[in-house]
Amino acid sequence: MSTIAAVPKIQRKKLQKRAPKDYSQILRHSVQLAFLALNAWIGVQFYLWVRYYETGGQSMLVSRPPGVEGWLPIASLMNLKVLLLTGQIPKLHPAGMFILIAFLAASWIFRKSFCSWLCPVGTVSEYLGQIGRRIFGRNFRIPRRVDIGLRSLKYVLLALFLYAVGSMSVDAIRTFLEGPYGIVDDVKMLNFFRFLGFTGAILMAILVFASVFVQNFWCRYLCPYGALMGFFSLASPLRIRRDPNICIDCGKCAKICSAALPVDRLITIKSAECTACMQCVAVCPAADALFLTAPRRWRVPAWMVAAGVTAIFLGVCGWAQWNGTWHTILPNRVYLELVPHANEFTHP
């Protein structure tokens, strides 16, 4: 007479539900929208400033918003190199350099928080992904091997930019930035979007549609700025941690992760792709199973991340303004001469 061994029952962990409602994503979206509104205001003011010089002083005169230089990452890297090698704060586009320093500092302390809390492109990309989820019920995941290959693209682009800036001497950087092209590179950037050609429009459309299907497509695969922030975030003392003794293995954290990280299978998230968005923490149904921690496992709430990144940004930019090194100061005659002909200047 044969006997069949009894299969032991797998005991499911008892769920201890979180008592207070999680408001981290409401807070994060509020910070995102505030920074998006700030960039929209800068964009409108900069457009009016450009139009004044394009019309030869016949339209409304507004001051040039220094914050527009935050959209000039290559010039900012050049100026940062000049600052590090000479100790001198550049006179042209210094605001962009200070904005870059603020974002790097925020990434170093609060992981790649710039991408999920402040970046306006990241905000738009995230909302496009939400549109995709409403239409299709989900976002699509690219196969892991393809995903890893595509992710390397942003690091390749970053390497090319770092090589280009690294190979330039201080004198070469100053000559470039103080030349006609360097002075109006912000105007050329605006004109790219104002007078978008057929090829540019097709590329923009592809990125928009890709972001609807694949969450944060641009940020995940192509953004060299985010890649730079990711490198700095590797030195951050903060980590997302999972307590396997409390975790009920529902997999919700991995499903919602915008970086497609296997949060449900790791104890500590060390990846440079983690943006400290805390969506995984917000969606976790088990009390104290998932949290953002500092050394000695001190828990870091979302409000502290919001306050930290905001304080760093305002502190660095505020210091530059107080120190009198925030604005690019050039005579009006220079802008009257160069701005109307911005598209005629080519890269030296």
Image (spheres, rainbow, N blue to C red):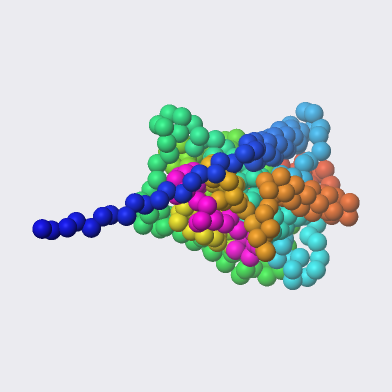
Q: Nearer the viewer, residue 280 or 143?
A: 280
Residue 140 at x, y percent in the picture: 40, 41
Instruction: Tell me which corner region of the image, top left, top right, bottom left or bottom right, holds residue 279.
Output: top right
Q: Say whether residue 252 is magenta.
A: yes
Q: Is residue 252 above or below residue 133?
A: below
The image shows a total of numbered marks equal to 0
Residue 12 at x, y percent in the picture: 42, 48
Q: Is residue 335 left or right of residue 122?
A: right
Q: Nearer the viewer, residue 19 or 205?
A: 19
Q: Is residue 290 above or below residue 33?
A: below
Q: Is residue 167 above or below residue 308?
A: below
Q: Is residue 196 left or right of residue 47?
A: left
- Residue 57 shows in the view: yes
On the rendered image, what quadrant is the N terminus found in?
bottom left
Q: Is residue 77 above or below residue 346?
A: below
- Residue 223 shows in the view: no
**Residue at horizontal 43%, vertical 29%?**
135
State the extent of the magenta-drawn residues as a range. 232-257
**Residue at horizontal 51%, vertical 56%?**
245
Q: Nearer the viewer, residue 103 or 28?
A: 28
Q: Say whether residue 7 is magenta.
A: no
Q: Is residue 235 left or right of residue 266?
A: right
Instruction: Tell me which corner region of the image, top left, top right, bottom left or bottom right, holds residue 74.
Output: bottom right
The residue sitting at the left extreme is 1
Residue 159 at x, y percent in the picture: 54, 64
